[in-house]
Image: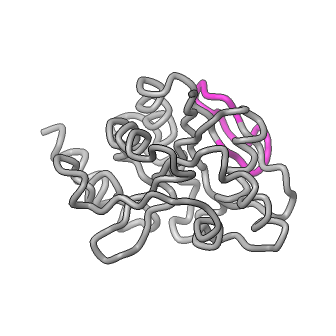
Amino acid sequence: METVAVILTGGRSSRMGRDKCALRLGGETFLERLVERYRGAFGRVCVSVDRPGRFDPAGAEEVCDRRPGRQGPLAGLEAAFLQTGAEAIFLTAVDLPFGDAALARRLEQLRGTADACCIRRAGGALEPLFAVYGRGCLGAVSACLEEGRRAFRGMLERVDCRTVDEAELPGFDLERILLNVNRPEDYAAARAAAEEAEG
């Protein structure tokens, strides 16, 4: 069963003030960094965009949203299934620059026969943008989009989702791997973490 890695490039980046795909760590843009990282684990990597040609996809396939005016992560997941024909999608966001391919593969294993597999953080919240989705999710994704629902929570309530507690993932630094860079101060923290790791 083929699993394709799909990197969501996001929207306006209003809190950051500039496109997060072009932010740099260790001499690479966030997008270049993640395409290279996941290509080594999955072979086939796609970049989800709201419109074609928005930027250089760093050698990955480009997947464009199919619902004008209804962009967002769910629209990206729908387009990825429809365009790639994949049996499963590892979905992540470009603003998770420390994403770990080994953890992505572990979630793929833990999914088993479930429709989806998401990490449940210690506080109880799910991480839908670092997760694995089987093709069985497509109907629920499309239904939510037709209803004008854009949140993953509503979609996940309609499918069989395997939730993985942090305690089931020993050896993975989830605070680092799931560090979400939304604001300038997050970017500063990410750069400091990258420099510390290199030093």
Taking 82 as reference, is 194 left or right?
left
37 to 9, vertically: above or below: above
Task: Pick out the residue farthest to the bottom.
Answer: 123
Task: Pick out the residue farthest to the front.
Answer: 113
Badge count: 0
Q: For residue 56: magenta?
A: yes
**Residue at the spot 73% in from the left edge and 56% down from the top edge:** 75
In percent of width and height, residue 183 lies at 44, 68
In percent of width and height, residue 36 lies at 45, 28
**Residue at the spot 45% in from the left edge and 47% down from the top edge:** 111
Task: Pick out the residue farthest to the left.
Answer: 199
81 to 131, vertically: above or below: above
167 to 78, vertically: above or below: below
> Image quarter for residue 2?
top right
**Residue at the spot 77% in from the left edge and 43% down from the top edge:** 64
In percent of width and height, residue 146 lies at 84, 67
Quadrant occupied by the C terminus:
top left
**Residue at the spot 69% in from the left edge and 61% down from the top edge:** 72
Q: Which range is magenta?
A: 48-62
In percent of width and height, residue 191 lies at 29, 51
User: Relative to the observer, which residue lies in front, 111 or 63?
Assistant: 111
Colouring convention used in this rendered image of the protein? one colour
Taking 170 as reference, is 52 left or right?
right
User: Relative to the observer, which residue lies in front, 33 or 84?
Assistant: 84
Taking 134 as reference, is 95 left or right?
left
User: Relative to the observer, which residue lies in front, 172 or 31?
Assistant: 172
Q: For residue 115: magenta?
A: no
Quadrant occupied by the N terminus:
top right
